[in-house]
Image (cartoon, grey):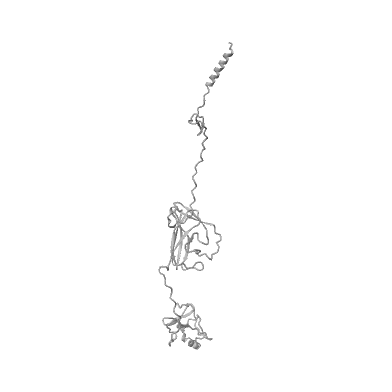
Amino acid sequence: MLINQSTRRILSLLILSSALGCVQERPPGRVVYMGGPHAGGPNAGGSAETSAPKEVPEPYAPPALPVIPVMIDPGGAHGFRCAVRLRLDVSPVAGERRLLRVVAENATGQPLALELPDRCPNGLVELEGLGPGYDYYGTCNAGPCLGVSSARRIELGPGEARPIAEATIALRGAPPCTSALPPGQHVVRAGVRTANVPVCTAEAVLDVPGAARPQSPPSPPPPSVPSRSTPASSDPYACQSPTDCVLSCPEPAGCCGWPCGCQHAIHRDHRAAFEANFEKTCTRPPRCPAVGCAFERAVGATCRNGRCVATTTLGGL
């Protein structure tokens, strides 16, 4: 069949028209792919503008808890934060001295280890309240410690309390390390500068007697009067005061002497006569007595119950 040129042109237009009808225009909108919106998708709506993919946020990490510093907690107001609670006990000891004992108590319900710097020759715990530079542990003349580690480890069970430091305080001073404390009440605190767990402490009062009543200034001493011995009686050993008595133990040649030391006390007014006549009355060898001395050598004489007697102390006791 012969097709002329006009027929061909009409057929070409029909074919082109049919092809254009099969092409559909993409509707406007946004399509979400893998969680990110893109323009022209079938699930989109609204604007035909292309949106940038959302950034996936990084996992949330809570901030690290701050390390609770070692703290002094007067009165235990924040005791619930303490892993270890210190207690300071004050007790009297012999003489005018007080014993300060520091006790560490585990305030938790589980075992723990308290690590403190070794402060040898001083104690593990620092004390304060008695004035700058006070030597609580009495180590002013102590030398360095040899073979000491840098830290001490103290293991405490749940609720366990254990003494970790002691110091003896001399209220009237212990030269050369400490001097006398002024009368009154002194607040003493115990603490540690560094530790591996939170440490809290309370305070204790050290009472130094003497501040309850103000004392009047001492009156001047009476003028000194030269000592006078009472007149001697016919009895060479009679006396009225300690100044009446002296030791007298002459040792002339040929006499047995005083094998156990001088123990002879006499009134001072009779001393010269006794020593002048002693050579005439003394016992001589071979009649010297054999003795076993079992007493102390006399160093003085005193008047006791109206008689001169020798004493073994300068005070006459």
User: Of 125 and 60, which appears nearest the observer?
Assistant: 60
Q: For the N terminus, which image quadrant?
A: top right
Image x and y of residue 276, in percent: 50, 88
> Which quarter of the picture shows residue 16?
top right
Image x and y of residue 66, in percent: 49, 50
- Which residue is situated farthest in the top direction here? 1
Q: How many labels does the image show?
A: 0
- The structure residue drawn at horizontal position 47% and vertical position 85%, both measured from the top left corner, is 268
Image x and y of residue 83, in percent: 46, 53
- The structure residue drawn at horizontal position 44% and vertical position 61%, both measured from the top left corner, is 204
Image x and y of residue 110, in percent: 45, 51
- Which residue is situated farthest in the left direction here? 213
Q: Is residue 57 above or below residue 136?
A: above
Q: Is residue 67 above or below residue 188?
A: above
Q: For the C terminus, which image quadrant?
A: bottom left
User: Of 38 and 281, which appears nearest the observer?
Assistant: 38
Q: In this view, does 192 lie above or below 267?
A: above
User: Of 138 and 43, which appears nearest the observer?
Assistant: 43
